[in-house]
Each structure stands twice: as structure tokens, then as C-alpha cells.
Image (tube, helix red, strand yellow):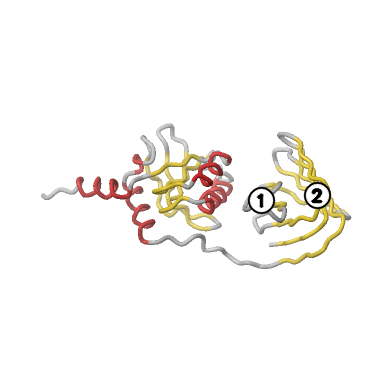
Amino acid sequence: MRIVVADCTVNYVGRLTAHLPRATRLVMVKADGCIAVHADGGAYKPLNWMNAPNTLTEEQGRWIVTNTKGETLTIDLHEIHFETTIEMGEDPGLLKDGVELELQRLLSEAPEEIEPGLSLIRREYPTPIGPLDLLCRDEDGATVAIEVKRRGEIDGVEQLTRYLEFLNRDDRLAPVRGIFVAQQVKPQARTLAVDRGIQWVEVDYDVLRGAETNSLRLF
């Protein structure tokens, strides 16, 4: 990851136009190519960003980021206060507790509890940034990426967003939509999911366990 703290102005041209006047901000360039501009506040969300894949062109005092959609993010660096590059290695992702693992197992056996017509393609589907919980196909044949949590918070939505970015680069799967599943989805996570075009679903662990128990038969 490359980290720069600088006085900068930022201009975005794409689906709309946006301008950030000169101020001291944090600019991050992640290993996967994502670029984000942060203020010293505002919690998790950057002021502006460009998801990968994109192209970063560095000129004297200026970064120009373009993507395949024709969007452009121009960052004018007026004064750099700090700059470093850190090799962070592979992230293991969020670790699941026993309930999350059991939820994942139960839902892999009954994906229709998430959405009618869903069928499982694979559990723990591998991606370059870690395994996706469930990869499914909906009744129209479209690919669906599902991340399962016991408690649905913002970090889980961010995790699913990163998975979707990689999965949608695979022509065999794209377009891939996402569903964030938890026993309880926090209001902030709901808002972020909707903003990212991700569905969210709450499931009842006890009902799922009961449904499994009721399906058992003696022969």
C-alpha cells in the first residue's frame, strides 16, 4: 500500500463532476489498484475514490487516474507532508466464529432461505483476496455472491464489495450481484449495502437449525 498525506485538490469527471478544494488529505493506493482520498474525519468512507481496474499516470505534482468506463480522477498534490509504501502481504479476511461457520453450512444446504430459486455453485469460492462464503446461481441463471455474518456490520459489506470487484472481472461469472446475509444487519451496514448496490437479508439461526432437524428421517 502507498500512503500519501498532502495538501491537494481533487477533481472527478464521470457519471457526474465533483470538486474537492485544497486541503490536507490522506491518499491511499492499494495493491489491487484501488485509490481512495480521505479527510481527517467521516469514519470509513473516502471523499472520493476510483475502484480497480484503472490506470494511474503520475505527472509533476499531479496524479491522473482513469478507468475503462472513461471516468477520470485528477489529484493535484500541492505540498506532500508524508509518503511511504508498505508491503502488507495477503489479508486473511475476517475470521468467523462457530455460529458464522454453522450459518454458512446451513445456508449452503438451503440457499433458497436467502432468496427463492437460489442454487449453490460452491461454498468457500476462492478469490485472489480470500474465499467467498457462497457462490450461487439465481433462478434466471445469474451469478450471486453471498457473504454470511453472525452480526452484519460495515466491515462485512466492505468485504463483499471487494469480492464483487474481483468476481466481476471473470467473464465466466459476470455480471455478479451480491447479497449480504446476517442474523442482524446493522442500520449503517444496510445503508452502505444499498449504496453499493448490494442486497441484505436477515436470517433466523434457530429456524434454520429447526428446518434441518425437521428434515432428518429414520430409515
What is the x, y in percent for residue 14?
A: 73, 36
Where is residue 206 drawn, in percent x and y?
Answer: 29, 49
Question: Marks 2 and 1, how far apart in space?
Answer: 20 Å
Q: Residue at x 76, y 55 (%)?
A: 25
Q: Give the amino acid at mark 2.
A: Ile
Does residue 52 appear left or right of residue 192 in this picture? right
**Residue at image mark 2:** 75
Q: Position of residue 109 (x, y in %)?
A: 32, 47
Q: Residues within 10 Å of mark 1 (few under 14, many from 20)?
A: few
Residue at the extreme right of the image, as rendered: 60
Q: Residues within 10 Å of mark 2 (few under 14, many from 20)?
A: many
Q: Helix, strand or loop at disc 2? A: strand
Front tag of 2 and 1: 1
Q: Residue at x 76, y 51 (%)?
A: 56
Tags 2 and 1 in contact by the CB under 8 Å rule?
A: no
Judging from the image, what secondary structure is the residue with disc 1 in?
Answer: loop
Mark toward the start of the polypeptide (2 vs 1): 1
Spot the residue most to the top. 140
Establish if 86 lies above or below 139: below
Looking at the image, residue 91 sits to the left or right of residue 96; the answer is right
Q: Which mark is residue 129?
A: none
The residue that disc 1 covers is 42
- Nearest the viewer among 176 and 99 is 99
Examine the image and state in which quarter residue 18 appears.
top right
Q: Amino acid at mark 1?
A: Gly
Q: Quadrant of the N terminus?
A: bottom right
Number of residue marks: 2
In the visual, does 136 lie left or right of 212?
A: right
Farthest residue, direction left: 219
